[in-house]
Amino acid sequence: MKDLNSISVNGMLAMDADIKGIKDDLYIVTLLLSVSNGKNNQGEWKPSDLLKACCFVKNPEIFSNLFLKGCTVSLNGRLQIDRIETANGKKEYHKIMCDSMDIKIIKHKEKG
């Protein structure tokens, strides 16, 4: 078995790609995806979910120029759950970790 923790998601970027340098030639790119939940029984759209996706890259320029708010993307990765203890109880944060080669633009959004 290759990997049981595998997830594929299509969604619209809710904000431009967030890029942070972590080493000389390594960056982490964070994408916030709005993912549709379809329609309810009355035919009305259900509220979308927001999912965070992160990947490590060596060429951040492509993300800053092409992965813009409103762009529709498809990505493959693995689900990671971070559990954080807060004063009023535990909270879980879900994010998708992916390889930069597993992110594709479905519908491009022009910059500006």
Image: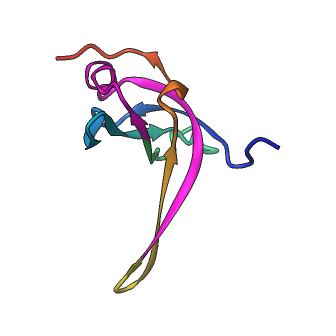
State the image quarter where residue 3 is shown. top right
Q: Is residue 1 left or right of residue 82?
A: right
Residue 99: give x, y in percent of width and height: 51, 34
Residue at the location (32% across, 38% down)?
Answer: 27
Q: Residue at x 26, y 37 (%)?
A: 24
In the visual, does 66 lie left or right of 1? left
Q: Quadrant of the N terminus?
A: top right
Residue 77, percent across and down?
Answer: 58, 39
Residue 10 on the magenta span = no
Q: Position of residue 86 (x, y in %)?
A: 37, 80
Looking at the image, can residue 105 be seen? yes
| Name of the residue lying farthest toward the front | 24
User: Does residue 93 lie above or below 9 as drawn?
Assistant: below
Of residues 89 and 78, the one nearer the viewer is: 78
Q: Nearer the viewer, residue 53 or 111?
A: 53
In the image, what residue occupies the spot 33% across and 37% down? 26
- Magenta range is 55-84
| Of the pair 36 and 94, the residue shown nearer to us | 94
User: In this orientation, does residue 39 appear?
Assistant: no
User: How many numbered discs?
Assistant: 0
Q: Position of residue 53 (x, y in %)?
A: 45, 43
In the rendered view, tell whether residue 89 sits above or below residue 11.
below
Judged left or right of residue 79, residue 110 is: left
Q: Name the residue: 26% across, 19% down.
A: 65
Q: Quadrant of the C terminus?
A: top left
